[in-house]
Amino acid sequence: MTTKRRSVPGIHPYDGPAGGWGALKATAIAVRTQMDNLTAPATLLRTNQPDGFDCPGCAWPDKEKHSTFQFCENGAKAVTWEATSKRVTPEFFAQNTVSSLLERSDFELEGYGRITHPMVYDRDSDTLRPVEWDVAFNRIGEILRGLDSPDEAEFYTSGRASNEAAYLFQLFAREFGTNNFPDCSNMCHEATSVGLPQSIGIGKGTVSLDDFDETDLIISIGHNPGTNHPRMMGTLHEAARRNVPIIVFNPLRERALERFADPQSIIEMATYSSTNIASTYYQVKAGGDAAALKGIIKALLELEGEIGNILDQDFIAEHTQGFDLLAADMAATRWDDIEKEAGLTRDDLQKVAALYAKSKATIVTYGMGVTQHNKGTANVRLIADLLLLRGNFGKPGAGICPLRGHSNVQGNRTVGITEKPSAAFLEKIQQVFGFTPPKEHGHDAVKAMEAMVDGTAKALICLGGNFAVALPDPEKCFPAMQNLDLSVHIGTKLNRSHLLVAKETYVFPCLGRTELDLQDSGRQSITVEDSMSMVHASSGKLKPASEWLLSEPAIVARMAKATLPQTKVQWIELAGDYRLIRDLIEKTIPGFDKYNQRIEAPNGFRMPLPPTERKWPTPTGKAIFSVFDGITEDISIDDPEMLRMITLRSHDQYNTTIYAMDDRYRGVFGRRDILFMNDVDLESRGLEHGDLVDIETLVAGSHQRLENITVIAYNIAPGSVGAYYPEANVLIPLNYIDKESGTPSYKSLPIRVLKHLVS
């Protein structure tokens, strides 16, 4: 920005690259403020190493486990945040009422440190007080058995839970009698889990890290890897240095997608140099992803008509169906409409199509900027369509790469955390365990909260996470949590959802991934599955934060045994030896053959991915092209002032966890009450950089509003604005979702911005 602007507190442009010395400084600060300086280096060096622990942050895989350090800035923050020396003791809770804690920020709540004892809410004193484990488990079992129906209970799972804990959790709920499994993936990549099976037969990505070594072209859509999956930056850095074109579509100019300095590069660190990541950067409008994708496909089909030999006709004929319907829809789609909705020109999209046509192997990476829309599932299918047109499945250097967030969110789904279980899985559960699991589909995250709002859900068991804060519409969600008969939260640190106390609330502290897990059979390993379907072991070594902690599998097992008096499952034995849990996973879920043996390899093993062999587990046995109905979001608003708002994570944030109040790469420090807006949109509304504004939701029937926010000029696509998550969730209606997947539309909310009037 060249024009002089008035100074705004906390807003200082950041001119450096992503990574580099700034990342090392931030890592050092995280270590100094959270951990003992003597133990921190050894702990960090065990991250993602053989006989070490898997990073509790993002799900980006490791190319190979070896001796060099395998953590990034935000990974270090995740580790030090968990391995902190700070403690939340019974004395802390005795001195702070729940009501007073609710007045503190999310940053403050988690910043107090690790919870040391199991706690129960005492209404008379409005405090959490210590409780004996068995007393708590027996009371929870009593309440659950007293429900009118098992479907009055909701079983929520965070993506940080291990395969072993998640498998026991789903087994507990299904023996109890429900398929109500809201989980964090419902709020991020459920559109992938629903859309990709319709297109290619499986709801997972198809690429490996080796494919990035062999690709000719990377198309990056709707994600910010420098913050949300930062170890990916090493992979993109290597590709860029090999001169692989990286085409970026994103409404904001994100620093990590522009320039990156690898902290492991001696030359870049010594010379203060960096590598350009994006070869071309297209600032697509919020909600314009479908239009951009349709434009590329349309241009590709036009090239085929003009010069031929562009599409992989043999692949299309042998492996796909529905091409003619796709082609007809593209022919009927007008370029004027594409340009208007995408915010890009025909020439822009034709250039992308031409590069794609020349590439022998292409990878498309995408994140929640694609999925968190009210047509998120259809967006995902358009990406698959683009790749199918040139046969970019089942060959080296090619495929689709959804970027999962939490470190085991994909593994949770693999081992049975789903509200829509397959008949084959339920049959296996019955054969192995001797009870008949429920067949009716249960609740996803939004449906679970809607059941709480209308009073039909009475109990909530949370295996990690910050359920109410992660969902939209806190004005509905927070009171609904407080109207429950029972809430149980398993976690390492205090968060706001724990404090939205029900008639009876329990907060259970568990071992973290960095900590030594000793059970009856000795030291335990858990397993996780990364974004590329690699399953590997993780084993912590730190002394537990408290002698009162239990592991997640132990908490789930003991709660299940206390709830299910007639159970035939050997819950306590399973909690004492996780190898026994893995044996049961092997018996009930395909792909886990020789599970315990294969995780002994440093890199573990890869789950089956039929599309990598050009096998399509769809009803027809072929990959299926889709037709995107229309060209934009499924909403029509006749308001010339309408903008589309994107919710954003700051760089010092992971999901709902806020490590600090800074967003270094976007030049925001010490605050989060910010709205990012383009200069053109500011001027047209009579606003200036630094003005206070109010934001109103424009969804029909909604009257949501966020007031007294500072608007700042930023390089974001015209017609688009950005605000921080979860603070901006107050603007998003709970039912503003992708109807196919149930994913909330956090990334394209229609809003109006008004100048704040000081009374």
Image: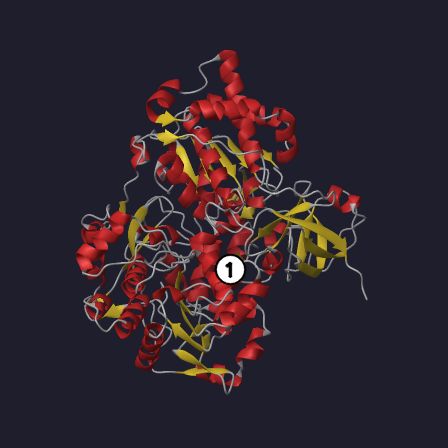
Whether residue 602 is visible to the viewer of this picture, yes or no, is no
**What is the total number of numbered labels drawn onto the structure image?**
1
Q: Residue lying farthest top?
A: 307
The location of residue 391, given as percent across then percent down, is: 39, 26
Q: Give the residue displayed 50% in from the left and 58% down from the top.
A: 27
Q: Nearer the viewer, residue 157 or 349?
A: 157
Q: Nearer the viewer, residue 432 or 411?
A: 432
Give the residue pinned by disc 1: 470
Quarter-wise, where is residue 52 in the image?
bottom left
* Image vertical order of residue 526 relative to residue 346, above or below: below
Q: Amino acid at mark 1?
A: Ala
Instruction: Locate the N terminus by quadrant.
Output: top right
Counting from the top left corner in percent of width and height, residue 671 is at 64, 61
The image quadrant where one finds the C terminus is bottom right
Q: Is residue 541 above or below residue 664?
A: below
* Residue 603 image point, x, y percent: 28, 48
Q: Residue at x 39, y 28 (%)?
A: 392
**Residue 106 % position (x, y):** 55, 67
Q: Secondary structure at mark 1?
A: helix
Pick the residue in front: 321 or 52: 321
Q: Residues within 10 Å of mark 1 (few under 14, many from 20)?
A: many
- Residue 321 is drawn in which quadrant? top left
User: What color scheme is it?
Assistant: secondary structure
> Can residue 161 be seen here?
yes
Q: Nearer the viewer, residue 415 or 52?
A: 415
Taking the view exactly as shown, the residue that stands out farthest to the front is 148
Q: Residue at x 25, y 64 (%)?
A: 524
Outermost residue to the bottom = 124
